[in-house]
């Protein structure tokens, strides 16, 4: 893999963002959903690029000092190379720059790779929402709410 750069998510990236999201989550968001989110005040998106190709993204928003990480995903072919960690670190830095004092997110309790990443950055579970996500093949999975107090 070539060198990975983290920079701002662009409108022209949204079809690739939707493709990566669909490959990563059962409840895929469309390009239009991402466009609406990024049009919100204080929303921001970050892109991970290798050789000018989008290979991962993070989308978040800050309001009243709270940053909510709405989605973070890496192309399945590029996983386990530290790209998710770099996107999370960049999201934390951007949240602080946007006046965030705390970062929140929710994650499916059965998403072990994401949980390892979030715990490695000291996010702590602060809540559990039973039956939150639909599971493939039927049933449901709980969402875990996680929090990180930001410096400054």
Image (cartoon, grey):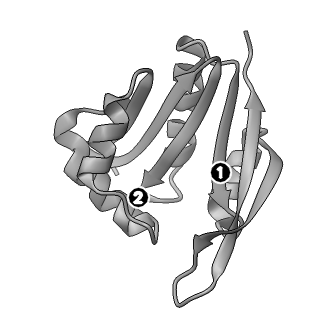
Percent x, y for residue 132? 64, 66
SS at circle 1:
strand
Q: Is residue 72 left or right of residue 9?
A: right
In the visual, does 129 lie left or right of 42?
A: right
Q: Which residue is located at x 46 percent, y 66 percent?
A: 25
Q: Nearer the viewer, residue 82 or 146?
A: 146
User: Residue 29 falls in which quadrant of the image?
Assistant: bottom left
How far apart marks 1 and 2 lie (CA) works out to 23 Å
Residue on which disc 1 sits: 106
Q: Residue at x 16, y 39 (%)?
A: 12
Crowdedness near tag 1: few (<14), some (14–19) or many (≥20) residues, C-alpha within 10 Å: many
- Residue 66: where, in percent of width, then height? 65, 25
User: Does residue 43 sit above or below 75 in this rendering?
Assistant: above
Residue 78 appears anywhere in the view:
yes
Residue on which disc 2 sits: 78
Q: 1 and 72: which one is in front?
A: 72
Whether residue 34 is situated above or below residue 113 in the rendered picture: above
Residue at x 37%, y 38% (from the top left corner): 37
Can residue 5 be seen at all in this image of the molecule? no
Q: Nearer the viewer, residue 20 or 33?
A: 33
For marks 1 and 2, the one nearer the N-term is: 2
Q: Residue furthest top?
A: 152
Quadrant location of residue 47? top left
Q: Residues within 10 Å of mark 2 (few under 14, many from 20)?
A: some
Taking the image as shown, residue 27 lies to the left or right of residue 116, namely: left
Residue 62: horizontal and vertical position, in percent?
A: 54, 24
Name the mark on residue 35. none
Tell me if 73 is positioned left or right of 92 in this view.
Answer: left
Select label 1 or label 2 by which is in front.
1
Looking at the rendered image, the quarter that the C terminus falls into is top right
SS assignment at label 2:
helix
């Amino acid at each position: 893999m070539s060198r990975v750069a983290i920079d701002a998510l662009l409108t022209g990236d949204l079809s690739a963002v939707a493709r990566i999201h669909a490959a990563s989550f059962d409840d895929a968001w469309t390009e239009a959903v991402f466009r609406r989110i990024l049009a919100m005040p204080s929303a921001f998106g970050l892109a991970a690029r290798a050789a000018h190709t989008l290979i991962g993204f993070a989308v978040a928003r800050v309001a009243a000092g709270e940053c909510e990480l709405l989605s973070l995903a890496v192309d399945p072919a590029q996983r386990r190379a530290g790209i998710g960690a770099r996107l999370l670190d960049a999201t934390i830095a951007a949240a602080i720059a946007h006046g965030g004092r705390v970062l929140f997110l929710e994650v499916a309790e059965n998403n072990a790779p994401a949980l390892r990443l979030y715990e490695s950055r000291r996010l702590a579970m602060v809540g559990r929402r039973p039956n939150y996500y639909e599971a493939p093949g039927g049933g449901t999975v709980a969402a875990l709410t996680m929090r990180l107090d930001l410096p400054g």
